[in-house]
């Protein structure tokens, strides 16, 4: 009997608070979105050159681009790694299939604790958003970083591992 009572209390509590918090019930809700993610395919362990771009288009909300370049890099002949967040002076996204045309200059907010740089930008729905999504989806994007690291003033990260998800409703938890 105590086990059954415990189960009923747990179930009732879940039902009462669960509708506000989700309580494990999932289903499509919210905005309709589509997104494309491209990343480097190198090892992501410490010291690797890892980068990722995500373009998300939303019906009913601003489109967004998020990006990150993480981990540390070691200059030739050096043994102490440089933290990217302290040494990147400029970043841009290029279309590698269109003669390296610059798609977007990226701002440089730091990412705490990730030894990297990155950020989230709201982009106006329309041709720029569509162009970014198509370039990322096609696997043509290249993230370029200008640094003050001796011997590595220009770092290029081809973003060839792609994941695309067409229009869908976000799942709520």
Image (cartoon, grey):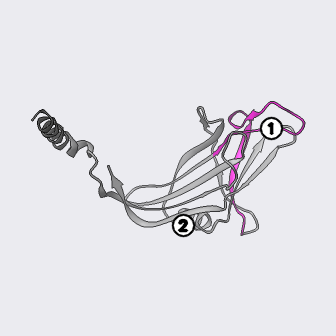
Residue 162: give x, y in percent of width and height. Answer: 59, 62
Q: How many marks?
A: 2
Q: Residue furthest right?
A: 77
Dot 2: what SS?
helix
Tell whether 40 sits left or right of 99: left
Q: Which residue is mark 1?
A: 74
Residue 64's tag is: none
Residue 130's tag is: 2
In this picture, is 64 found above or below 126? above
Q: Nearer the viewer, residue 138 or 21?
A: 21
Marks 1 and 2 in Cβ contact (< 8 Å): no
Determine if the magenta segment contains residue 25: no
Q: Which residues are magenta?
A: 69-97
Q: Residue at x 17, y 44 (%)?
A: 15
Dot 1: what SS?
loop
Bin the neighbour count of mark 1 within 10 Å (Cα to Cα): few under 14, some 14-19, many 20 and up: some
Tell whether 115 sits left or right of 78: left
Tell whether 168 sits left or right of 149: left
Q: CA distance from mark 1 to mark 2?
A: 36 Å
The image quadrant where one finds the N terminus is: top left
Residue 37 falls in which quadrant of the image?
A: bottom right
Residue 23: give x, y in percent of width and height. Answer: 26, 44
In this picture, is 143 found above or below 149? below
Q: Nearer the viewer, residue 51 or 25?
A: 25
Q: Nearer the viewer, residue 170 or 133?
A: 170
Residue 43: give x, y in percent of width and height. Answer: 69, 49
| Label located before the other in sequence (1 or 2) | 1
Residue 75: give x, y in percent of width and height. Answer: 84, 38
Tell whether 55 sits left or right of 24: right
Residue 8 falls in which quadrant of the image?
A: top left
In this picture, is 108 found above or below 138? above
């Amino acid at each position: 009997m105590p086990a059954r009572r415990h189960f009923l209390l747990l179930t009732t509590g879940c039902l009462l608070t669960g509708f506000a918090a989700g309580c494990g019930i999932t289903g499509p809700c919210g905005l309709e979105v589509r997104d494309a993610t491209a990343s480097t395919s190198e090892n992501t362990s410490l010291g690797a050159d890892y980068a990722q771009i995500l373009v998300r288009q939303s019906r009913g909300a601003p489109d967004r681009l998020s990006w990150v370049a993480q981990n540390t890099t070691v200059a030739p002949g050096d043994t102490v790694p440089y933290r990217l967040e302290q040494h990147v002076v400029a970043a841009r996204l290029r279309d590698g299939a269109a003669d390296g045309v610059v798609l977007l200059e990226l701002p440089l907010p730091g990412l705490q604790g990730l030894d990297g740089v990155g950020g989230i930008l709201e982009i106006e729905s329309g041709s720029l958003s569509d162009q970014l999504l198509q370039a990322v989806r096609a696997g043509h994007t290249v993230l370029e970083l200008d640094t003050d690291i001796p011997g590595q003033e220009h770092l290029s990260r081809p973003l060839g591992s792609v994941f695309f998800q067409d229009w869908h409703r976000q799942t709520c938890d």
